[in-house]
Amino acid sequence: MDLAVDTTSRYAAARRDPALVVLEGFHALKHALRFGAEVLDVVAAADHALGDLTARLAPELASRIGALVTTTVSAAVFATLCPRPPQTRVVALARRPRHDPAAVLAQPGDGPVILLEDPRTMSNMGACVRVAAAAPDVVGLLTTGESDPWNPAALRGAAGLHFALPVARATGTEPTDRPLVAVDPDGDELGTTAIPPRALIAFGTERYGLSDALLDRAEVRLRIPMRPGVSSLNLATSVAAVLFAQSRA
Ligand SMILES: C[S@@+](CC[C@H](N)C(=O)[O-])C[C@H]1O[C@@H](n2cnc3c(N)ncnc32)[C@H](O)[C@@H]1O
């Protein structure tokens, strides 16, 4: 088969394959490799700078990136591989890890699990994963609802950091001993009530906020202070604010 047609059809098929993920851009590839992903191959546009990017941003990965099967394609073929081709002119395929939400919740230790209730915006969900991955003590991130947290746009928003901690879709009804903390604009001011160890920290859907079902179950409700007249913060900004406050507590 023609190399260009083969590359385009392989990446299109990979987007539909629940066992694979498409990593869009060098940063996603870099983080995936740093956090143990099984990367299958790389495709780069003819004007890529994979060597320079590696030397500048991830020199410790030089031998691993150099050992990956890398196909170079024209800019026109590269443009068929992603809805928005990344500026770094690199995409890659990796195997998708599967995490059992019950096992994520059952992890030992005091670290919190983040719960996103029915998130709708993929890039926002990715930004939440990125923030959670950066917080050293967060042990996992779960989502409820229809959206797949491993969607390529979410992976891109997370710069590939889904591989840094378990990320999985949950029903929200998994049994857990974790105290539920609801982050909600009507809660107690952040910093006045402690977040308990092993918390399951829940954030609501972008338009409607947390459901009554989760609010009613919560042991603690926390509000991030805002200027009067502001209705709410962006979802990922809220996750960042709470995790930063928690790290300083
Ligand atoms: C965009 S907001 C949802 C807005 C929704 N209209 C509401 O009033 O909750 C998405 C989520 O971010 C969190 N959030 C945003 N601003 C917040 C604040 N000031 N205090 C606490 N949580 C906040 C909540 O978890 C909220 O459910």
Image (spheres, rainbow, N blue to C red):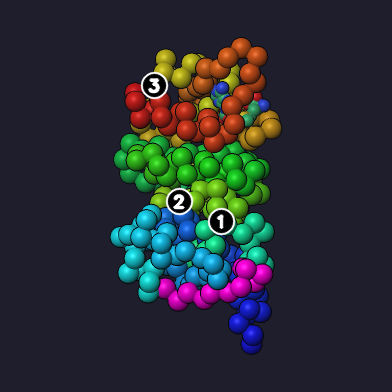
Q: Give the range drawn in magenta.
A: 68-78
The answer to whether residue 236 is left or right of residue 200 is right
User: Element type at marker 1?
Assistant: loop
Whether residue 133 is situated above or below residue 48 in the rendered picture = above
- Residue 162 is at least partly visible in this image: no
Dots 1, 2 in contact, CB < 8 A: no
Name the front one of labels 1 and 2: 1
Mark 2 vs mark 3, CA separation in Å: 28 Å
Residue 84 percent across, percent down from the top left: 64, 56
The structure residue drawn at horizontal position 37% and vertical position 74%, both measured from the top left corner, is 67
Residue 190 percent across, percent down from the top left: 46, 19
The dot on residue 87 is: 1
Tell me which amino acid carries mark 3: Ala
The dot on residue 180 is: none
Residue 226 percent across, percent down from the top left: 56, 17
What residue did someone put label 2 on? 161
What residue did someone put label 3 on? 194
The structure residue drawn at horizontal position 47% and vertical position 44%, both measured from the top left corner, is 130
The structure residue drawn at horizontal position 40% and vertical position 51%, both measured from the top left corner, is 164
Image quarter where the C terminus lies is top left
Residue 196 lies within the magenta run: no
Q: Earlier in the sequence, mark 2 or mark 3?
A: 2
Tell me which amino acid carries mark 2: Leu
Residue situated furthest bottom in the rendering: 1
